[in-house]
Structure formats: structure tokens, C-alpha cells
Image: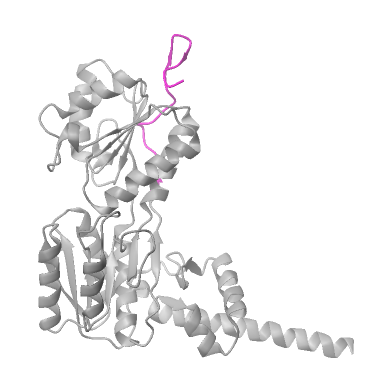
Amino acid sequence: MLRSGTRRWKDVDMLAAERRAMILALASEGGAVRIGDLVDRLGVSHVTVRRDLEGLVAEGALDKVRGGAVLSADANDSSALRGVRSGFSGTIGVVVPTSYYYRHVVDGIGAALEHSGAEMKLVISDYDLAEERRLVAEAVEDGAAGILMVPSVLEHEESSELLDFLAALPVPVVLIERELPGGGLGDITSVRSAHERGVFSAMRHLHDLGHRRVAMVSRGRTQSADFVRAGWVHARDVLGFDAESSIIGGEMLGFGPTWERGGSNVVLDAIESTGATALFSHGDENSLFLLLQAARARGLSVPEDLSIVAYDDEVSAHADPPLSAIAPDRERVGELATRLLVEAIERPSNDTPLHIQVEPRLLVRSSTAAPRARGGRDAGS
């Protein structure tokens, strides 16, 4: 009896191993797997599939996402292995705004398609939703089999018109660095940077150094900026920063590509008036170079008198001193979005949306340090 019972358990273990091998193979082919598809394909329960996915996630082979899992970036380090591996050889339409940020996303899309017969048709918008809709419709008319797009929607604005437009399209759509507004995620697959988590890691770094009063510069009028600001407020409250920690926005600095003339002094005046010992800046790396010069002119030292963290890492490493920064993995966002779109093109019956968030990295450089004690206590206390 014992021998028989042991054999049955070995059989169960073998079946689990076989299932996990099949799940991993399917993830390697398409980049992602969905729980509902695996239940049908493997003929097992949702509980069994979830257990198998949890095991593969624990092993580092998969990353868990809502509704399924995606192949871990660490599982295959080669861009060729991480790209699209399918029979798709058509064209996808890509609609992104005119911003340096999306150059890296497009690089990720290109890398995902590099070893397939597919190609992208790239068009640039100007943060104009009506124009974006026109460009999408034009791409579909020209034969695009699917659409990757960055719609100009804010987190707290009505999105029913956009949803109706996307739902009426005869091809699948994946949103890049956006979600349908409102926090409900919606019926359209999306891939974006986990901006809130990136902000939290930066604020935790400053908190661990001893900062308690932090100013933030954020002037953006995009959904990504909404996520960054929400993440900053959440981190401020959860980590216990002073209530005087505040946001310096476009009303003070203007909403143009860079701060308005004298913007560096506006920021430094706000920092000095509130007693902030650190600055977190979103989307203004180039302006931070001017801020560093203005700070030196006032006799302020970075990081001794003011620690600085930039959100994004386009030029931060070249500042003097090099800036600590949050670095979104924009290429990974583009790559994952492409793989999910190709899967939707090839398997249109699988209409369960996935919502993937790619976590940014905190790069600590010499622009952050413990706050200098003033009058026997930290300035931020």
C-alpha cells in the first residue's frame, strides 16, 4: 500500500512538472499566458493553474500579472529570445506622442519585431486625442493588423468616447504607458511603467537618509504625470513625511518644454521658504542642470544642503554632481506591449485583457545624502 501510494504521488509530481514545462513553453512562444487559456488547454482547475504559475513565479521564470503571467525578463537575457516568435508577418500601427521618452519605447517595439517577419508603421502625434484617433483609423485603413498607442487621456477624465472608438475598431489595440482612466483598468490591454512604485522607492530612499520635508516639481499634463503625483502623495503620507512637503507645479513654472525664465529661482525660493532638504523632480531633467547652477550661485551645496532625485534617467548621470534617478524600463514596456498585441492578432478569441506594470529602477548617485544638521537638528525635522 505504501509503495502504491508513493507511486501515485510521484505521478502527481510528474504531471505538475509536465504542466509547468508546458506553461513555460507557451510563455516562451507568446511572451504571456492567461489563466483561462491554461485551464482549457491543460484540462485542470483554476486553482491548479494558479498554483503552477505561483511556482514558476517563485522560480523566477515568470512574472505575475493580472489574469496570467509573462515571461520573466531574467529568464532569457537575449533580446532575440525575448522577441516575437510566431508566424505573424504583417504590420502593426504605432501611435506615440512627440517626446524623447517614447523613442526608447519604440526601440523596444523594434527589438520585439526584429527576428520576425513583422514590421511597424510609426506615426507621431502631438498630445491631441482627436488627431490620435484619426491616425489610428488611417493605420487600420492602410492594413495594420493591430495598434499600439499612447492616447492623450488623463487619469480623472471621462473615457467613454475613447473606449467606444477603440471597441469599434476591427483590430486589437494595446495601450502603452496608459490605462483607461478611473482605476478600473478597463477592457483594453495595457502595458505601462509602475510609476507609483518608482516614486515610492525614491521617497523611501530619501526617508532612509533622514529627510522628512521634500519638495516635488511636477508640471506634466499627462496620465503618467498623474500617476507620478499620486505615487508621491501616497509615499509622503505612508512614509510619514512632513505635511509641509508640497508640489511645485506648472502654475509657478509654466507648462512649456522647460521651466519659464527664472524657474530655478522659483524652485529654490520655495525650497528655502518651506525648509525642504530634498527635491524630487519629474520630467525636468534638463532644467535640473540650471537648478544646480543656481543653487551653487546661492551657496547651496548638493547634496549637503539639498538632495535631488530625478524621475527618468536620460541625462541625469551627466550632471554635476550626477543625479540619483528613477529609470523606467521603457524598452521593456514596448517589447511586452508588442508581444501581447501579436498574441491578440493571432488568437482573436482570447479577449481577456491583461494589465502589466513594469517596475522602474532606482539608481543612487552622488546627489543624495543625509540632510545637514542645522542648529543641532535636521532641517527637515
Q: Residue at x 26, y 60 (%)?
A: 158
Q: Position of residue 31 (x, y in %)?
A: 40, 75
Which residue is at a point 26% across and 77% down the rendered structure image? 167
In the rendered image, is residue 363 in sight? no
Residue 24 in view here? yes
Q: In the picture, which quadrant includes the N terminus?
A: bottom right
Residue 336 belongs to magenta span: no
- Could you tell me residue 164's position as x and y percent? 24, 74
Q: What is the chief secondary structure element of the magenta stretch?
A: loop
Residue span colored magenta: 361-381
Residue 380 lies in magenta, yes or no? yes
Left or right for 113, reference 349: left
Left or right: residue 337 compared with residue 64: left
Q: Horizontal placement of 28 versus 181: left or right?
A: right
Q: Residue at the spot x=43%, y=78% of the render?
A: 28
Who's the residue at 60% across and 71% down the image? 55
Q: Position of residue 64 (x, y in %)?
A: 49, 67
In the image, residue 89 lies at what x, y percent?
Answer: 23, 86
